Image (cartoon, rainbow, N blue to C red):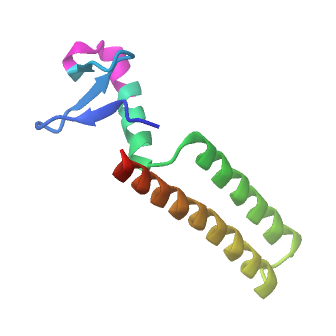
Amino acid sequence: MKRLTLKNQSNEIMVKDIYGKIHDFKDVPHEFYGCIRKLYDYENTGLNPEEIEMIVEALEDMRDKLYKADSPNAYSVSDCCKTLNTILDVRKKEKSAEALQSLNG
């Protein structure tokens, strides 16, 4: 997903419109600046909506595994570590694919 926000030399957030034109934050109604700031922060995570949903589901799954175990034990903790490693591996592969795609133009 391409960014819609960026910072200028003065470290102020700028936003792209649907036509790709970049607007200074002063061009944006004051009421929308908070929304643009949240979008900027979200874009800085580097995650797309599907990845965020996957993380939420994984965290819920890990919580359920730990609750079902009554008290964390080696098996439940190991299972949670596998889930975390899966998430991180998927993210690493996607970043590698993005880097390769940007090199190929």
Image location (x, y in percent) of residue 5: 32, 32
Please report the residue visible at 38 percent of the width from the left and 50 percent of the height from the top. 104
Q: Picture quarter containing residue 8?
A: top left
Q: Residue at x 76, y 76 (%)?
A: 79
Residue 48 screen position, x and y as percent: 54, 43
Instruction: Count all numbered tags in the image, as a single digit.
Output: 0
Rendered view: 14 above or below 48? above
Q: Range of the magenta residues?
A: 26-34
Q: Is residue 47 left or right of residue 75?
A: left
Please say if 8 is above or below 59. above
Q: Say which quadrant the C terminus sits in.
A: top left
Q: Residue at x 45, y 52 (%)?
A: 98
Depicted 105 relative to depicted 74: above or below: above
The rendered magenta stretch, by its main secondary structure, is classed as helix
**Residue 84's quadrant in the figure?**
bottom right
Relative to residue 73, is residue 103 drawn left or right? left
Q: Position of residue 41 (x, y in %)?
A: 39, 41
Is 95 included in the stretch rendered in magenta? no
Horizontal arrangement in the rendering, residue 70 relative to residue 6 (left or right): right
